[in-house]
Amino acid sequence: MNITAPVNNRQTTYVGIALLMGVIVGEGLNLTLAVNGALPSPPLLGQVIEVLTLLTDIFLRLIKMIISPLVFSILVVGVAKMGDIQTVGRIGIKAMLWFFLASFSSLLLGMLLVNVLEPGKSLLIDLPPLDAQTGLAQVRPTLANFVAHIVPKSITEAMAGNEILQIVVFSMFFGVACAGIGEVALPVVKFLDSLAHIMLKVTAYVMKYAPIAVFSAIASVIAQQGLSVLLTYGKFISEFYLGLVLLGMLLCLVGFLFVGSRILSLLKHIREPMLLAFGTASSESAYPKLLEQLDRYGCDEKVCGLVLPLGYSFNLDGSMMYMTFAVLFIAQAYGIDMPLSEQFFMLLVLLFTSKGVAGVPRASLIVIAATLSMFKLPEAGLLLLLGVDQLLDMGRSATNVLGNSIAATVISRWERADDL
């Protein structure tokens, strides 16, 4: 299933322009709302923001429409062509080893940066009351929740809910079974191979809508929060994005050790999926395009078909760094000193509990809330993050895409199953 078409530079340009225009229009709307602050908000402005939000929601729904059949078809075909469970197991073990090391490094980098930069100690805004409510769903990272999000009780329910990890589990069983019965399964494998090509074509159609989605997502966020929020939280936001840049450089350095200067070509290929994830604050929105671009880059489709879906559950590097960064930021904001030994223990807890809320909306914040409670830190500190979480989510979503791209590339080279 190799795609030989050239990288669509024009589409990337359109997404970049949409990003800039979204900031300009969003700030204009925010200033208009500020001018009318003493009066009832103009109904028209509220309707404009509602329409912008709706436009983004349409795109995300279209992406979710694609993901389940795309993951299922590509993964089944890939596993069936691998031919044996040993190959699947070997790639899976390599992927999980990479994910573990990348997650640990991301958490550790976040911890080190907060200790060095101390963004919470210079906070000049009022702290929320200790008994304030965050409004987040009360979901605790537990082993039971983790297992529930891994093992499907119904493949149709898993697909309907876009539970990627459950789809991966069923697809691996299905693919291994296809390989096990040989020629009898060939019609099914050929059908799913055709389905994968069809879904990639559908992806190409949906992606034409991407610039509109990015524009509406950015304009909606800026209209409601305003660029002025960058002044209030400037130190925290800038230092977090500095951390993301350092994490990205670290990931690229490791990638360079495996593929050399071809890492630059990889970055060129994935710039549109990264921009898309940044603009919509959703790494999931970039998944179909990312799969296509990695195929164009030369990564083996069978490896990508297995590694990427697993990575979307276990290898969210930007989100992992955010967890330690946010918890320690809140501790500093309340003037609570956490010894390094306790911080390392927290890091290990996050390494495992972050996998227990797969599929839960705003999972990062829920894991952070559970960690605050576990270490006797004020959960109300989350209110300090809620106002800027969307802006932070944009950066960590793009970093998640970068981390999974490099993971797929490295494991593809590790398997010596690529055209790099």
Image: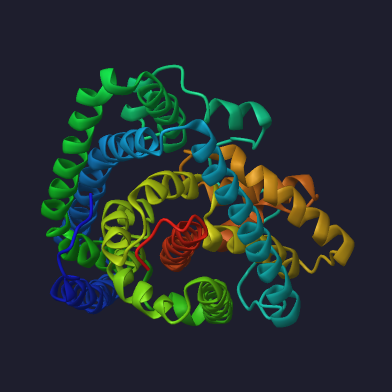
Provide residue 416's location: percent of width, then percent of height.
46, 58
- Camera-side residue of 232 and 126: 232
Q: Position of residue 291 (x, y in %)?
A: 31, 54
Looking at the picture, does residue 36 appear above or below residue 300? below
Q: Residue at x 39, y 56 (%)?
A: 283
Residue at 59% from the left image edge and 35% from the top image edge: 139
Vertical position of residue 256 compared to residue 348: above or below:
below
Return the residue nearer the eye: 392 or 312: 312
Seen from the viewer's position, the closer of residues 273 and 112 is 273
Residue 143 higher or lower than 340, as above or below: above
- Please name the colour scheme applied to the rendered image: rainbow
**Left of 281 or right of it: where is 60?**
left
Camera sees residue 331: yes
| Relative depth, front residue between 95 and 70 | 95
Expressed as whole percent of the image width and height from the top left, the position of residue 410 reads 50, 63
Number of callouts: 0
Residue 38 in sight from this viewpoint: no
User: In the drawing, does residue 185 fall left or right of residue 110?
Assistant: left
Q: In this view, does 401 lie to the left or right of 205?
A: right
Residue at 19% in and 48% down = 200
Query: Which quadrant would the C terminus be assigned to in this image?
Result: bottom left
Q: Measured from the top left, where is residue 405 in percent x and y?
A: 42, 62
Q: In this view, does 167 lie above or below 111?
A: above
Q: Residue at x 48, y 44 (%)?
A: 310
**Residue reaching furthest to the front:** 183
400 relative position to 380: left or right: left
